[in-house]
Amino acid sequence: MRRLAAILLLILPMVLQAANVSGYVADAETGETIIGVNIIVEGTDNGATTDVNGFFVIRRLPPGEATLRLSHIAYSEQTRTIRLDSEDLFLETIPLEPAVLQSEAIVVTGQRGNLIQKDMDIASFEISPQVLREVPQFNKDVFQLIKYSPSVTIGDRISPIYYVRGGDPGENLVQLDGMTIYNPQHALSMSAIFNPYAIKNIEMLVGGFDAQYGGRNSSILYITSREGHQEKVQGEFRPSSSGLVGAIEFPVRDKTTAMVSGRFMSDLTPRILMGMPNLMADFNGALQTTIGRTRLRFSAFYARDYIDYDFIRLGIYFKEEFMRNYSTGFLTNTNNNAVGLQTRSVLTPNLVLETHLYHSGFQVDNKNFIKFRAQDTTYEGNVDVVLNYETRVINEVSDNTVKASLSWFTTLNQTVKLGVEHNDITFLNDAGIFSLPSFSTELTSTLQAWYLQDRVELGPLLVKLGLRNTRFSPEQVWRQEPRASLALELRGVTLKAAWGRYHQYVTAMNTQDAELSQFLDYYYPLRHMEPLTSIHHILGLEGRITDQLDYSVTAYYKDFTNLYRFDYFNTIASIYSYEAALEQGEGEAAGVEFMLKGEAGRISGWISYALSRSTRRYASIQQGKTFLYDGDQTHNVKTVLLYQVTQDITASTTFQLTSGFPKTWETGIVSHYAYNPVSNTYGLFPEYLTPVKNNVRFPPRMDWEIGWKKQLRGGFGYQLAEYLGTDQAYLTLTVRNLLFLRRNPYMYFYLPGYGYYAYDISYFPSVQVGYMIKF
Amino acid sequence: MKKAGLYPVVMLLVLAVWTCSLPHEPGPQPSTIVETEFDSALNVFGVLRLDGKINSSFFYIERTYQYQELDTIAWDESFIPIITNATVSVRRLSDAKDYPFTYELDSLRGEIYTCDYFIPTAEETYALTVSHDDFRTVTDTTTVPAVPALDADSVIVWGDMVYFQQRTAADVYLYDIIMLSSEDSLQYRFQNRDGATIPIAFQSTAPPEESVDIQVYGYDANLAEYLTTTITLKPQTYNETVTTVTGGYGVFGSVSVAAVTVPGAP
């Protein structure tokens, strides 16, 4: 009976085909497609909203004349009259003229309209990119922005690692125009390796993903890049004390645009004071063209990090002998690259074919060390005791992917998407400690997937059903990942629910206990092993308090039925088999998130609160007892507020108050012995006694930052911009760590005769002044 | 409206001042989730070494200690958590013969326990008992591995390279191969691979002109596990304390030694 119903659901649309109208909507000046344009057929309830590609399909239009009304908050409203017979119609591209914004406040929620609520994905955090541009604290960086999602918790302050709803950091997927990017952040900072100028749209899915998304279990950060300018050369240039940032977009020829951007940064302060070489660079490029009904996009990017930090270089400023005999530091060397070709063809007004071929690569060679030298005068010989603790991790990923999908927009408000993917992925792993030889392994696997996603709108009800099938070689087993979600809109309130099973075939090594700070995920394939498995249950409520103020309440429960513990020390101990170092476990996460978002007068922004709990169980840890997960934060208050002081000035403030992380507090010290077989002597290192994992919670963390952005209308800054041929110059001021007297401990050191000292990263507020011109 | 907008700012400032701590102050402290007791116990490092010499086998014993005891170090340099008055006994299980190990101050190895007539026997199992009035008794057993097979004729010294093959034995769980010459001291460590023969190649910084010493150390299961365990020096991180003994901490294991000396490069 169920099968019959399913077949009917698929066949019925074919029987009842009627006229559909589809097309793209684009900016009349730049030619860039616009996301979130509402298109209503006048005199009816029928309409559509443009998707992430600026594409729309309006269904079941009767033959005859119809008037389409197109609206978007950033564009002038426009109407277009069309004449339909019984055939489907493709309208090519409808241009919209940009409008002068009338809103008193900076709009943070993107476009609002009658249809937008139904089209929004379940459990998404979608913020207008304008927020990135207007809040200088974010430094135009997507990873700074997602810190303010109620679903995200951040690791220590010097690490870009983040947790989403109790999942492991290695379960977060970042895609740039559909290309999977491995470790998309610069080392030592929450800074993405994508130039913010190049970003057109950011969407973060924190659960309940459609079947088209796979490969990671916790979150999808989907970044869409800009498409270039079809009429003139446009860009920005930002010099600063730490480097140069520039971007330029321009027309190549008719219907062909291009964009090139780059950043080259080196922090001068440590370079001068400590002689610390450091370099962070990234370059993006894109070329887009339209041939008939096919849009082609070629995109490429390259990023590079090199940091050589050695604490002993600070020793020159101190007289103490200790400073010359103690050193700690790291040497990180990363390289990230991707190149891809994407096509999107409107085969018929109802049928869209998308293909994607790309290569994504990542290489890291990361060393951490602690060196200590002391003279031992206890016994004869005055032997120097030298501790040379060094960890080294090498990880390389080479991902070659080809994927294709076919979307069919039926007349029954049903969209069926069928897709296939083939990824050849090679992983190189190497981990070592002290000066012992490390063990290197290189493994190649193939991940194959096909999926079917069905989306049906039945009046106020939106239902999405999906099935993703995956196979990870050399295993021949196909695994199913069913997904389902619905949204029901009743009297302005939308009830949302989602359920899904997710598999992930790579795991990431946890080095947080071994490295000074874990900057990166080190990936390892799960060959011949059960994949990481999560089951998401989500229930949410969304609505509006006023026309400009939205609220949402979301509850979730995640069942991690299969997890792996792949920590650095286990890996080192299993010298000849990384797989032997993998320990299977399980866990759970649950929480409730509240969010208020929108505009009120000149104030806009959002405030959120999350209550959550996340746990883990592994047989080798405390005999399999449940313990609090490292990324657990019980309470989590975040707010981002913007105040439009004048048309030219925007003031902003960001604030976070969160519970501290659970940590393991040592009860005492036990010497760990080393043995020198040649001399038949022993050595010893103090090791912490930690019988219970995560037995304390660190103090609550608090962060407060303010920003100020002003468009210059006169003075030197404006004249400089004019000299360079533009009239858009901006000055920004950012003050970070305003609560510098409120310490957010990173770790505690026991100081004899003093007690436990809470060590923080920064003890002073930081003030940054920036200047930017747009041309 | 302006006054209302000031309230959050004032509240945040009050909160900041209320919760602040100056850099010289200890700062906010963590809150307890699970009460965790300190385990006061003996920490033993015991090696039975089969190298044809007496007095090669020894024990070093400490106790665990709390951070607060480190305060003593600041004022009294004599604080060292070494145990010098324990009773240490090793029993050969095949004939139940006991060997008492007594405390001595060794010029090289410091405060250790030795037995001046004890030489372990290959493939024999020994049981350890360490007792002390103030701590739980520590016990463990070890089986001494067979002496590693090492044939001097199989060692080839060619230029700056030294080659040979090491045949592994089932009762040896970890090998350390050491090459010593006047120019270099090189080490290669590997875990047993089911009796396979492992090709070994050392590259010196210069061709060894005089003799070359090859030393092979074969460890039992206890030492193999303990010596391949790593520790973290980062505070507030969970680390399962690896111990092979019962009733305390540390390791009781055995190692067999084979050594040959071959001429340097021709």
Image: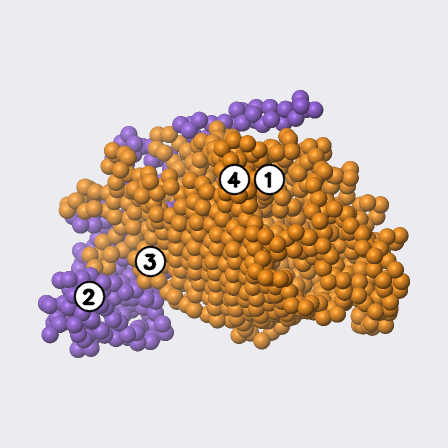
Chain colours: A orange, B purple
> Tags 4 and 2 in contact by the CB under 8 Å rule?
no
Task: Bin the neighbour count of mark 2 within 10 Å (Cα to Cα): few under 14, some 14-19, many 20 and up.
Answer: some
Measured in 3D between alpha carbons, the distance from the residue under mark 2 to the one under mark 3, in whole angstroms, is 26 Å
- Is the same chain shared between marks 1 and 2? no
Measured in 3D between alpha carbons, the distance from the residue under mark 4 to the one under mark 2, in whole angstroms, is 63 Å
Q: Is residue A361 left or right of residue B171?
A: right
In this view, the mark in front (1 or 2)? 1
Q: Chain of mark 2?
A: B
x, y percentage for residue A288? Answer: 59, 62
Q: Earlier along the polypeptide chain: callout 2 or callout 3?
A: 2
Residue B204 shows which numbered tag?
A: 2
Question: Tag 3's secondary structure?
Answer: helix
Residue B144: which quarter of the image? Answer: bottom left
Q: Please say whether residue A378 is visible from this viewpoint.
A: yes
Residue where numbered disc 3 is placed? B227
Q: Chain of mark 1?
A: A
In this view, the mark in front (2 or 3)? 2
- Is the same chain shared between marks 3 and 1? no
> Tags 4 and 3 in contact by the CB under 8 Å rule?
no
Measured in 3D between alpha carbons, the distance from the residue under mark 4 to the one under mark 1, in whole angstroms, is 19 Å
Question: Tag 4's secondary structure?
Answer: helix
In this view, the mark in front (4 or 2)? 4
* Amino acid at pointer 3: Leu
Residue where numbered disc 1 is placed? A134
Which residue sits at x=12%, y=70%?
B264
Measured in 3D between alpha carbons, the distance from the residue under mark 4 to the one under mark 3, in whole angstroms, is 65 Å
Q: Quadrant of the N terminus of chain A?
A: bottom right
- Is the same chain shared between marks 4 and 1? yes
- Is the same chain shared between marks 4 and 2? no
Which residue sits at x=11%, y=74%?
B266
Residue where numbered disc 4 is placed? A721
